[in-house]
Image: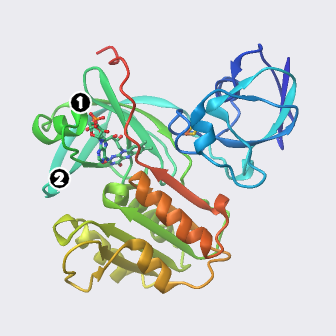
Amino acid sequence: MQLLVQPLGKTIEFQPGANLLETLRQAEVPVSYSCMAGRCGTCRCKVIEGSVEATSAVTQENPHPAGMSVLACQATLTADCAIEIPEPDEVVVHPARIVKGTVVSIDAPVSDVRIVRMSLNRPLSFSPGQYANVQFMPGRERPYSMAGVDTDALIEFHIRVVPGGAVSGHVATQLKCGDTARISGPLGTSYLRRQHDGPVICVAGGTGLAPVLSIVRALLEGGDRRAIHLYFGVRSEADVYGAGTLSELAERFPNLAVHTVIATGPARDRHRAGLVTDALDSDWGTLDGFRAYVCGSPPMVDAVRQTLIAKGLGYEHVYADAFFSQPETAPLPA
Ligand SMILES: Cc1cc2nc3c(=O)[nH]c(=O)nc-3n(C[C@H](O)[C@H](O)[C@H](O)COP(=O)(O)OP(=O)(O)OC[C@H]3O[C@@H](n4cnc5c(N)ncnc54)[C@H](O)[C@@H]3O)c2cc1C
Ligand code: FES
């Protein structure tokens, strides 16, 4: 049986019962995906001829916007059909690699965040905003977003220490300089869209600052002078980190406006009090023509996405990475 992928005009043979996302990946179609569990919505594509079967109830909980009809990771191919993948012109494919990182430094800018920098045994190219699967400890791997750009001397991850977290707990208490980690990637689709040249809003919740810093640095250090509005939302003043990096960037680049927004308790140092969604709501009228990059916890990403869409930003122009935790599966081989 055959699957036609538009607008590439590519035809792929498949066996009935094949998973749509797997089929696209095996055929090296540059399709975007992230959680592979029907939760993030990244692999959404449109069935334009024939039909596919949704394989999970999760799909029902992910209402699709007009014209976008199926989550590829949750769809089974049963008969000839045609699908359309979004934005193939902006799909960037880096070679998937497994590299070895050696920990060079671990900083704790606030009590529940660790900034881990590693040297790599060979280069890993990625687009600003992407993530990699990192195996800091035997048997468990987790996705973490790169905080820098791929020409930096060291790769950098910002890891929030989650209560009871297997990997983040290991990073907080066991990981030390000289330890090695297996890094595979890059992955993810909330990367910088370089063909758009209008204004940009970046919203980071907590360690969502990592991919947002990657995007903002790539724009600014690449000489881009468009308006960039960075909103950094944290729970309280005690959770603010990276302030030095952000103010240094804002001083060097007048086209960058940084808003640090404190959800609870008093706000200091010209920070703003309230929810990041309220700050966006009061700062902006229509956002037609903007692009937005949103990274952080799933509830925050959902709320921000709704706020931005209500202001006229197209659903497809909000590039979001929600930091879903991973469903518990059998540990990986060590
Ligand atoms: C695409 C992607 C990119 C990501 N990038 C980053 C990143 O740059 N920085 C980062 O810190 N994290 C990031 N994450 C989250 C990260 O992959 C892990 O889920 C997180 O570090 C927790 O792993 P753990 O092993 O410590 O916790 P686990 O052992 O997996 O979970 C322990 C318990 O904590 C809960 N839990 C897990 N995560 C959270 C959370 N964030 N908040 C509250 N409770 C939680 C779980 O439900 C579980 O009950 C990303 C996730 C995705 C999907
Ligand atoms: S990759 Fe399919 S919904 Fe996340």
Labels 2 and 1: the sequence-earlier one: 2
Q: Where on the picture, by quarter, is residue 309?
A: bottom right
> Which residue has dot 1 on it?
180
Where is mark 2, residue-wise?
112
| Residue at 53% across, 80% down | 227
Label 2 to label 1, Cα distance in Å? 22 Å
Left or right, residue 302 beside residue 330: right
* Kind of residue sitting beneath label 1: Thr
Residue drawn at x 68%, y 49% is 64
Q: Nearer the viewer, residue 166 or 217?
A: 166
Q: The residue under label 2 is which amino acid type?
A: Asp
Q: Is mark 2 within 8 Å of ligand 1?
A: no
Q: How is the image coloured?
A: rainbow
Question: Where is the C terminus found, in terms of image quarters?
Answer: top left
- Number of numbered discs present? 2
Tell me which residue sits at (42%, 78%) in the image. Answer: 278
State the SS at label 1. Answer: strand
Could you tell me if residue 18 is visible in this image? yes
Q: Badge 2 local density, few (<14 within 10 Å), some, or many (20+)?
A: some
Q: Position of residue 86 (x, y in %)?
A: 73, 49
Examine the image and state in which quarter residue 56 appears. Answer: top right
Q: Quadrant of ligand 1?
A: top left
Left or right, residue 17 beside residue 100: right
**Marks 2 and 1: which is nearer the front?**
2
